[in-house]
Amino acid sequence: MYTVLVYLILLTRVQSFPFDQFLHDQSDSVLNFLKEQSRQVEHALTSSYDRAVQVKNSFDSYVEEQRNKINTEINSCIENVKDRGRQIADSFTYLPTEEADAKLQNPDVTLTVPARVARNGYRCETHTVVSNGYLLNLHRIPHSKNDRKISPKTILLQHGIFASSADWIMNGPGKALAYVLADAGYDVWMSNIRGNRYSKEHAWLKTNTKSYWNFSWHDVALHDIPNIIDYIMKLKGEGTKITYIGHSMGTTILFAMLTLRPEYNNILTAGYALAPVIFMSDFKSPIKSLASVGKNVAHMEMLYGSHEFLPKNSMFGEIVSSCNVDYIDDKICKNFIFQLCGENEKQYNETLLPVFLSHYGAGTSWKTVLHFAQEILARNKFQQFDFGPSNNQRMYGSDQPPEYDLSKITLPIHLYWARNDLLSSEKDVKMLLDKLPSTTEAYLVPDPKFNHLDYLWAIDASTLINSQMLSSLQSTFEDHL
Ligand SMILES: *[C@@H]1O[C@H](CO)[C@@H](O)[C@H](O)[C@H]1NC(C)=O
Ligand SMILES: *[C@@H]1O[C@H](CO)[C@@H](O)[C@H](O)[C@H]1NC(C)=O
């Protein structure tokens, strides 16, 4: 990476690389450093022929030296941002104080995840993992309320699209998975995807640039989750066992990772996929009809427009505006959610709606949205990002993007699915099950109306999901001791 930076600087002499744009994307301290490097190189190349030859001859050592310098600079920048990132993630609330005051009737609406966990009497830690320069903040509940011993049995929870670690605590102690798992003695880690409220900072890119938002869940699967797993393994040391649990896009990320980085089939203990979103041939949500339109809009936005996708600012957001925390029309909003995700009056707890909405709707990249629209249109293919025929040739060496090769998966997988989940249909879950190893287990949630979001807020979460999951996890970890 750093070598590449130096080469880029040198190349500006020769090619018309859009250097200004490149610099524009960098944070100020890296920017000043790069400018100085560029000036020095330019000076060497223009002062005299001998000097230029000298530079050319000592090119290797020069690159090495610059790389170290840039490394040091970037590391200190990372440390700097890491401290700031930590403060943001650990602060009490993410709303301006005056606004927070107005909303104190229900503190869960305004408080950050660490504050909410602490308020319920659990210990909560924030850990920062740097991946491709993104500062990913993880929230950890290391043990139960009473027993302070930290178990080697570790759970990594990965949320879905537009969401955050808040998903796993929303249903409150006794019901929400993060608390239930901590109570059962597991060391619980909740990751936050790059670009969301808790993982917004980047070591050298500004957050309003195209380069910053140039990712989809593919990149999270390829870099971020492996870096997070490595971090936890290193921190906890030998004997650590990690089981991954993902919801919705969290499952997409899991399966993509197990095919792109097959070594993690051996590092993890098991993978749990709640509401798997892998094949979308039988996608029943009305979002489907938006996919083909959405694909073009998303493509244009990705190329020319704003690079961050904010649900609130989109066509989608217009429809959801009645679902804004500041102005909730409970009924319209509930119906809207039911329409998109499946109706289930029985498991729906309306006091959680404002809490859900205040934490939901974190921005993501247009590329993520576009990648999903492509998956819906590709129907029964689970494949990498489609750049269009000519760019696919350049990127992948073929007109079509490569499929994720599910035959590489050897990890024990547990699929959790439900009959009324409009985003994860029976047909698609069966198709996935067929392609996974024979050790795969599928659990049908015993409520015919259970929907995509009920995993996060179901009134009967304990009997429908948690008890089954706890016994399954127990045997999973026992198999590994
Ligand atoms: C975005 O990433 C692709 C590779 O995935 C790369 O070819 C392209 O140059 C990147 N664009 C920007 C603006 O960083
Ligand atoms: C709904 O959620 C609130 C807040 O977590 C909780 O106090 C209440 O018991 C829940 N209602 C039901 C019916 O479970």
Image (spheres, helix red, strand yellow):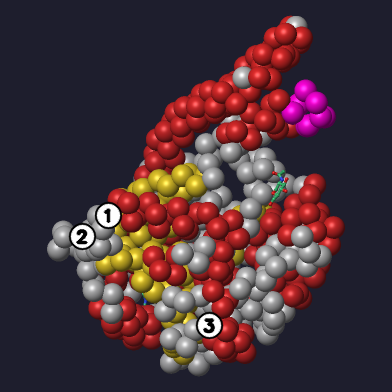
Q: Can residue 284 be seen in this snapshot?
A: yes
Q: Position of residue 47 (x, y in %)?
A: 74, 6
Q: Position of residue 208 (x, y in %)?
A: 65, 40
Q: Position of residue 443 (x, y in %)?
A: 44, 88
Residue kind at label 3, given as amino acid type: Leu
Residue kind at label 1, given as amino acid type: Lys
Residue kind at label 2, given as amino acid type: Ile
User: What residue sits 49% from the left and 84% below the top?
Assistant: 437
Give the residue number, with chain letter if any, for mark 1.
236
Give the residue number, with chain letter if any, for mark 3.
436
In the depicted structure, whether residue 468 falls above or below residue 337: below
| Mark 2, secondary structure of its residue | loop
User: What residue sits 46% from the left and 64% below the top?
Assistant: 263
Question: Alpha carbon of mark 1 to alpha carbon of mark 2: how far?
Answer: 9 Å
Q: Residues within 10 Å of mark 1 (few under 14, many from 20)?
A: some
| Mark 3, secondary structure of its residue | loop
In the depicted structure, whether residue 396 falls above or below residue 245: above
